[in-house]
Amino acid sequence: MDCFGIYTLANDVVFDQLVALLNSIEVNVSPDIPICIIPYDDRLDLVRQEVNARKNVILFDNWEVIQRWEEFAHQVWAAPSSKKENKLSRSSWYKSHLQRKFVVFEGIFDKFVFYDSDSLAMKPVNNLIHKLETYDFVFDDWEHLKDKPVAALDISVIEQTGLYTEADIYSQLHCSSFFGSKRGLFTIKEIEVMKERLITDREVEWINGWWDDAFLFNYMTLRCDRPLFNFTLSPNGEERTGNCANADPFVNINNVLYNQDGLKPIHRIHYMSYSSRDFARLCQGEDINICYRDEFLYYRFLKQPEQRPKQLKQPSMLTKTNIFFHKTMNKLQRTFR
């Protein structure tokens, strides 16, 4: 029988989110499925403590594989491209380590599902596992509805090659915050071929952005020509749901969220657009405006209910000023780096 497991990517900076995710998986997915945490960087003291306290959680420690994927991404983003001529177009995670999530393709599980750490799992993944019998990649997102200027791939450029039509490309678009797949789909040889196409053949121009793991992943899944399934394109309407905390309406039933339209079960809620600092401050008792924050706090302190803030307090004016200052400085640094 194939070994199935769960991956996520984390460090101490997202510790509160990691704990909430692990607790939600244990309650809503399964307490028995093994979980492997991929280190985002070397800040792992709290993560290691959490790993040691849980029976089914381990830390990915094959640094040769991590380095290989880091170098692949770095070389791709260093290639000449018109997409990065304007420095203002640099993504907010410029020079991040998000591409480390690709080590899943050389990891320890034959089949797997990956959750971004800023997520909460809401239901078992039996249907995803079943889809992996037919498909090599399984997603659950609405990236295929994005307009051309903000899509992961430059559809007009790709169409000019004659290899894919606009319809072909749009049906393949996806994000990288949640996906199921299999080990071994991208071998070292295949990655070298892909790197040659991206850099030498300038197919990096197919990617509609710069230093974005999701955009690079879209190129990889399109170019490898393997079967892909997205639940949001399923002919079964029960499988089409929302997933974003700041965009989709959900209903809470016993601390499990359901799609408001039809009360359909969702795979996960994704707290995209909120910073790890926001969650840290929330967990320290600050009244931070995060959608579905009560659900997050429930899972964050599921095993330590006595540590959950009894009452959320408004941050002081000094704190608000400092937060605004740091956000402004971070934005300026990213812009002019």
Image: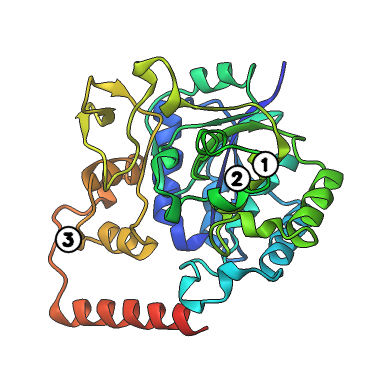
The amino acid at mark 1 is Gly
List x then y, in percent, for residue 85.
Answer: 57, 76
List x then y, in percent, for residue 125.
Answer: 49, 23
At x 69%, y 47%, the residue is: 103
Residue 252 vs 89, above or below: the answer is above
Give the residue at mark 2: 159
Helix, strand or loop status at disc 2: helix
Q: Which of 115 and 179 is in front in this view?
A: 179
Give the residue at mark 3: 287
Q: Is residue 103 left or right of residue 334?
A: right
Res 322 → quadrant: bottom left
What number is the disc on residue 162? Answer: 1
List x then y, in percent, for residue 153.
Answer: 55, 50
Helix, strand or loop status at disc 3: loop
Identify the image's colour scheme: rainbow, by chain, secondary structure or one colour: rainbow
Q: Is residue 203 left or right of residue 145?
A: right
The amino acid at mark 3 is Asp
Q: Which of 81 and 110 is in front in this view?
A: 81
